[in-house]
Amino acid sequence: MKKPRVMLVGAVGSGKTSLMKALTQKEGPVTKTQAIEYHSRSIDTPGEFLENPFYYRALFATSLEADAVLFIQDATREESSFPPGFAQAFPKKTLGIVTKTDHPKAQVERAKEILTKLALKGPILAVSAWTGEGIDELRKLLEWD
Ligand SMILES: Nc1nc2c(ncn2[C@@H]2O[C@H](COP(=O)(O)OP(=O)(O)OP(=O)(O)O)[C@@H](O)[C@H]2O)c(=O)[nH]1
Ligand SMILES: [Mg+2]
């Protein structure tokens, strides 16, 4: 059976690539994502694709190649870059992920509230790519183990 693949969508610097590496147990430095990147288990997207509505169509089209879409909200950010109900435009399993829970300025509840406005089909999880908090739980939810 083909292994499921996730796509990551979120603002610039929200922690998509770091999370993708933690999830897929890839080592090495995290660099800025410049284009949509296809991997066997994941599709990483540049934050600019969420921040500029010109690219929404590219996100919708790309999501057809994924089994689930993860909407990423940085726990240290007050603002949302997501339009209300955005997850409904993706005909896939949709999950919310709060990142950087280890950060001293993280406000997890605030970030969760932002994600509830997306009309997700699945749950919201809080993770840290640095400490590994929540990563195993996410792998289980994605049925990767
Ligand atoms: N404290 C903390 N910082 C993190 C975590 N994950 C990512 N960061 C930091 O957040 C910054 C952005 O991380 P990236 O993973 O490159 O973010 P991105 O969403 O892929 O950004 P773009 O590729 O520009 O869209 C980097 O400086 C990371 O080190 C985390 O779990 N905890
Ligand atoms: Mg990136």
Image: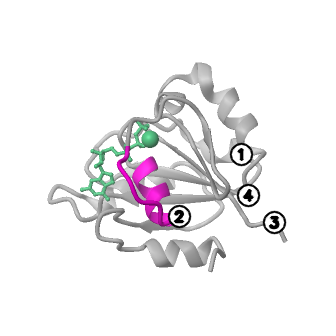
Residue at x-position 62% and y-position 80%: 145
Could you tell which of marks 2 and 4 lies nearer the N-terminus? Answer: 2
- Residue 49 x/y as whole percent: 54, 29
In the displayed image of the protein, which residue is found farthest to the top?
A: 54
Amino acid type at image mark 4: Asp
Label 3: which secondary element: loop
Find disc 1 in the rendering and name its residue.
Answer: 90
Q: Position of residue 13 (x, y in %)?
A: 35, 40
In the image, which is nearer the foreground, mark 3 or mark 4?
3
Check disc 4 and report its element: helix, strand or loop. Answer: loop
**On residue 137, which mark appears?**
none
Q: Which residue is mark 2?
A: 24
Residue 2's disc number: 3
Q: How is the image coloured?
A: one colour
Neighbor class of circle 4 (other Cα within 10 Å; few <14, some 14-19, many 20+) is some
* Of callouts 3 and 4, the N-terminal one: 3
Q: Which mark is residue 67?
A: 4
Hey, what amino acid is under mark 2? Thr
- Residue 51 sits inside the magenta stretch: no
Horizontal arrangement in the rendering, residue 96 relative to residue 78 (left or right): right
Kindly tell me whether mark 1's CB lies below 8 Å from ligand 1: no
Foreground mark, 2 or 4? 2
Asked if the beta carbon under badge 2 is closer than 8 A to the nearest atom of ligand 1, the reply is no
